[in-house]
Image (cartoon, coloured by chain):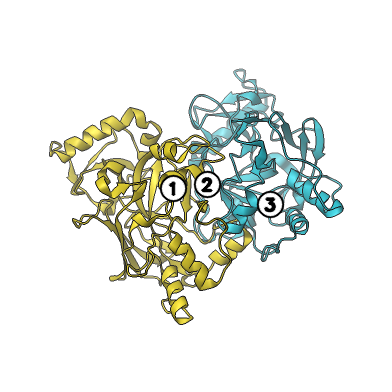
Chain colours: A cyan, B yellow
Amino acid sequence: MKLATYRNGEADGCLMVVSRDLSRAIEAAGLAPNLLHALQRWDEVAAELQHLSDALNAGLKPLARPFDPARCMAPLPRTFQWCDGSAFLNHGHLMERAFNTAPIPDFDSIPVMYQGASDDFLGPCDAVPLPDEAFGIDFEGEFGVITGPVAMGATPEAAQQAIRLVVQLNDWSLRTFGPREMKTGFGFLQAKPSTSFAPVAVTPDELGQHWRGGRVHLDMEVTWNAERFGHPNGGEMHFSFGQLLAHAARTRKLSAGTIVGTGTVSNAGGERGSACIAERRAIETIAQGAPVTAYMRFGDRVRMAARLPSGETPFGVIDQQVVAC
Amino acid sequence: MKLATYRNGEADGCLMVVSRDLSRAIEAAGLAPNLLHALQRWDEVAAELQHLSDALNAGLKPLARPFDPARCMAPLPRTFQWCDGSAFLNHGHLMERAFNTAPIPDFDSIPVMYQGASDDFLGPCDAVPLPDEAFGIDFEGEFGVITGPVAMGATPEAAQQAIRLVVQLNDWSLRTFGPREMKTGFGFLQAKPSTSFAPVAVTPDELGQHWRGGRVHLDMEVTWNAERFGHPNGGEMHFSFGQLLAHAARTRKLSAGTIVGTGTVSNAGGERGSACIAERRAIETIAQGAPVTAYMRFGDRVRMAARLPSGETPFGVIDQQVVAC
């Protein structure tokens, strides 16, 4: 099934079930007021949500209305935990080569992951207010999963079983702060403003053969100011989502509603472009000694959509403009 | 006023108003079901909570019952954001000297702060389940604040005005993971299991003259297995809470219910001992070339209480045992 959250004046929004082709949507508030609530009572409500989804897809819900992404908040407008990995090793290796930094220890055997702010996610069409163009405004196209409860010490296999929904996201980054915050050892904070999400969260089965090995085998199409920027494929992820979740749960349990992201989707070889400006700048630096592409300006737009071979966008589209706050 | 949260089977618990001397408590569920809810509607409920608190302190609430810390969850058992600073420079300087690591850049002019997990906080008397004694189990005695909304780019003065409550906490740490996670640049994740809180959250006015300059001027008494470990004073904090909050809010707004901590309370000179084992080990390493004190074992207890000169403990007491999970 496919779920979304409409703005309704409440911080957690209103839960919607969306048809497979994203053409229509119907309120699920009778089953759960919002997605966070549904995730906390998943065993009670999942079957009923699935039933509603089946009926909607069968054209049996005359009260359904055209689905409107502009009314969408993030599928989870806020939650209690958000962790983001860096599971595409190609991205990390490019950054190290370009900036001549020390290799991250055990980068290919232990996931790196930062804890992010989860109190204020942005919807797919929301403006992105930021304080200063000089902060190195960048996008990062990623996939993520939303989990049920994961026990402390869970294996990757057990953790993967707890995946409820798959999402697509833009992990906005302010590159000016990154290197200093990495040097402190305390990780990213000012470098990571509010993260944005595509409108539709989907159960893994909705991705069919494109969900396998705990990875999303889809191209992430990124367009910056109407110019095609990159379309790397999510299947090249080094660690599976199960491995990322087990890493996060090694010394603590994860509550229902936890979101874990992949880090910037990135493919070796370079033919597919990048899903963030920093990586393109790294490639330019390696090739030419210096970056050519500048970071984003106020007024710029970025569009991101994972695309099926059929042309459909299973998560809908992120289409946002950066503005001065 | 003083607030606590009783366990009631719900994830957010039941909001209680506690008398100034911590002798009695009364349910505030008629005003707000839980503290997270109250913080999100603070302007509507604060006056009524204060009224209930005043009546309780005046002995006018015969339905009040003896306050029982053993029934307490953390004041906020979960919330949408938790950030922890390292605002006592003495602690950072000792760690650098002992381990001969590079100084954190701008340590005395820009706060360092990591984003922590906020989905599963522990109550003051809860057992602390951890997977392995070999992980370097350590406590960190700290103060913290719980905020209302803070705008992106808020000044330290404006941010300080958003402080709703002051708390006392134990930021459990697994030292085996810390150095590796710092080297990745992505910050602490496995090194920071669930954080514990003293039972009572207090409005700043409850601390009287001991709340000034955005700092808690109280000794943090730490006892490990019934042996006095340290009693550093919170007044030596280099950055004020207003400065810490402004740092966290520089590139994003903070939602109501955000918790920001001080980092381990630490005083120069050493006469007052430490609020974490790692700092004592650093002092031993500097003095004798190697640490002497071992980290915690399963079955160990740690007790923490900030104490007024009168002997009272305004936040109550954290008293926990570490157990195998």
Query: What's the chain of the residue with tag 2?
Result: A
Report crowding for label 1: few under 14, some 14 to 19, many 20 or more residues within 10 A (C-alpha). many
Q: Is any part of residue B129 visible from this angle? A: yes
Pick the residue in front: A1 or B124: B124
Q: Chain of mark 3?
A: A
Q: Chain of mark 1?
A: B
Q: At x 58% / y 54%, what residue is drawn?
A: A187
Determine the CA span between mark 3 and mark 2.
Answer: 20 Å
Q: Is residue A143 left or right of residue A291?
A: left
Which one is in front, A9 or B217?
A: B217
- Amino acid type indicated by mark 2: Gln
Disc 3 or disc 1, which is closer to the eye?
1
Q: Please indicate whether residue A199 sits to the left or right of residue B63 in the image.
A: right
Judge whether A225 appears above or below B209 on screen.
Answer: above
Q: Which residue is mark 2?
A: A81
Residues flagged by tags 3 and 1 on a common chain: no
Mark 1 lies on a secondary structure that is strand
Q: Identify the element where label 3 is drawn.
A: loop
> Quick one: label 3 or label 2, which is nearer the N terminus?
2
Quadrant housing the C terminus of chain B: bottom left
Q: Where B233 falls versus A292 (above or below)?
A: below
Residue identifier under label 3? A214
Residue B140 image offset from top left, x and y in percent: 41, 61
The x, y position of residue A9, in whole percent, is 49, 24
Instruction: Say which residue label 1 marks.
Output: B260
Q: Secondary structure at mark 2?
A: loop
**Residue A203 shows which numbered tag?**
none
Front-most of residues A27 and A179: A179
Q: Are marks 1 and 2 in contact (CB under 8 Å)?
A: no
Q: Which is more foreground, mark 3 or mark 2?
A: 2
